[in-house]
Image: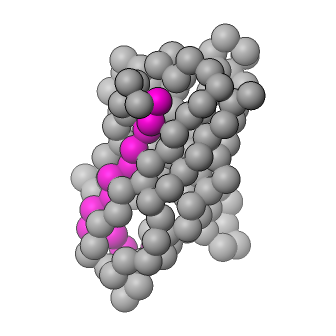
């Protein structure tokens, strides 16, 4: 059974930083394209960043230059380093994995709340 468990959310002042982690179990992590998404109250879930095993990372325009996605295949973990946080970054952040061996079946974590105060 594939499981994704996020951690690292919290409350931070505007301009601060947080690092989110997502540990994956139950599958071969190294082959999975991984991503981070977020969902603010009353809004649809949106892509934040993605990182495949070999490809360069992909970022949404609203986080370019502030957020960095990385992965440690030895630890089955993907990270999201968030710097220069803004109140509009407040959302629940979700980790996502797609399995190319199973028609890109998607898996999601439970989400972690990030709140940026003014």
Query: Which colour scheme appears in the figure?
Result: one colour
83 left or right, relative to 54: left
* Percent x, y of residue 102: 73, 15
- Taking 5 as reference, is 9 above or below it? below
Foreground residue, 30 or 99?
30
Rendering coords of residue 88 (x, y %): 46, 74
Total number of numbered labels?
0
Q: Residue at x 41, y 31 (%)?
A: 75
Residue at 29% x, 66% y is 17
Instruction: Read off the magenta span.
Output: 76-88
Q: Residue furthest top?
A: 101
Is residue 77 highlighted in magenta?
A: yes
Residue at the spot 47% in from the left edge and 64% down from the top edge: 9
Can I make out residue 59 in this image?
A: no
User: Which residue is at the far bottom?
Assistant: 118
- Residue 5 x/y as whole percent: 59, 46
Relative to residue 83, is residue 76 drawn left or right? right
Q: Is residue 73 above or below residue 118?
A: above
Tell me if residue 100 is in the magenta stretch. no
The answer to whether residue 105 of the structure is visible from this angle is: yes
List x then y, in percent, for residue 97: 59, 32
61 or 84: nearer the eye?
A: 84
Quadrant for residue 25, please give it. Answer: top right
Q: Residue at x 51, y 33 (%)?
A: 34
Q: Quadrant of the N terminus?
A: top right
Q: Is residue 117 left or right of residue 31?
A: left
């Amino acid at each position: 059974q594939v499981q994704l468990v996020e951690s690292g959310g919290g409350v931070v002042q505007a301009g601060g930083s947080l690092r989110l982690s997502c540990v994956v179990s139950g599958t071969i992590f190294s082959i999975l394209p991984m991503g981070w998404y977020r969902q603010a109250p009353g809004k649809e879930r949106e892509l934040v960043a993605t990182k495949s095993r070999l490809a360069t990372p992909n970022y949404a325009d609203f986080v370019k230059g502030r957020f960095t996605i990385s992965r440690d295949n030895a630890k089955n973990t993907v990270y999201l380093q968030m710097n220069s946080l803004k109140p509009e970054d407040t959302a629940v952040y979700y980790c996502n994995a797609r399995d190319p061996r199973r028609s890109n079946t998607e898996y999601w974590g439970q989400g972690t709340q990030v709140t940026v105060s003014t």
